[in-house]
Amino acid sequence: MNINVITFLFVIFGSISAGFATGAIAHYLGNESLAGISSPQENPTTQYIDRKNNDPDQEFSLINEQELLKEINDIKQRHKNSRR
């Protein structure tokens, strides 16, 4: 065999091996980092959906933007004054 073919095969095999090794290490570290994490037993948004379905008389209402902005500005002023 030609030395160039052997070198080429060696480089390809080394690259594939390095890719598999990196993937295995990443998989192991990912599993270790998520070892204590678990998903919730139920969907937390169902309480909002159930509450909405239980009150059929509740209608959609718009929020007055001016009142909301005034309230936000008041809160910002209180926080600004409390820092002094």
Image: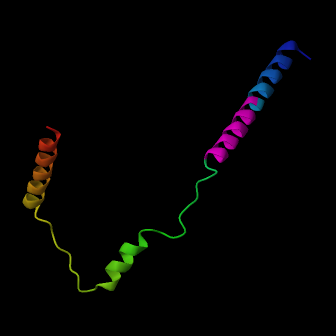
Residue range (magenta):
18-33
Locate residue 26, reporting x and y percent: 66, 38
Residue 14 vs residue 39, the one in the foreground: 39
Residue 54 horizontal side relative to residue 31, left or right: left
Q: In this view, does 55 lie above or below 77?
A: below
Comparing 80 with 70, the one in front is: 80
Q: Which residue is drawn at 11% across and 46% down?
A: 77
Q: How many labels does the image show?
A: 0
Q: Quadrant of the C terminus?
A: top left
Is the image coloured rainbow, by chain, by secondary structure, or in one colour?
rainbow
The secondary structure that dominates the magenta segment is: helix
Q: Nearer the viewer, residue 6 or 58?
A: 58
Does the magenta segment cover residue 82? no
Q: In which quarter of the image is residue 28?
A: top right
Nearer to me, 75 or 20: 75
Instruction: Please state the horizontal and vertical placement of residue 16, each as a whole percent of the image.
Output: 75, 31
- Residue 73, how many percent across, how many down? 11, 50
The percent coordinates of residue 43 (x first, y second) are: 48, 69
Q: Is residue 70 above or below residue 24?
A: below
Asked if residue 37 is positioned above or below residue 59 in the image, the reply reads above
Residue located 38% across and 79% down the image: 50
Residue 82 occupies which quadrant of the picture? Answer: top left
Q: Where does the N terminus fall, quadrant-wise?
A: top right
Q: Is 26 in the magenta?
A: yes
Q: Describe residue 68's horizontal placement relative to residue 45 as left or right.
A: left
Where 49 falls versus 13 (above or below)? below
Q: Which residue lies furthest to the top in this view?
A: 3
Residue positioned 86% across, 19% down in the render: 6
The residue drawn where x is 37% and y is 75% is 49
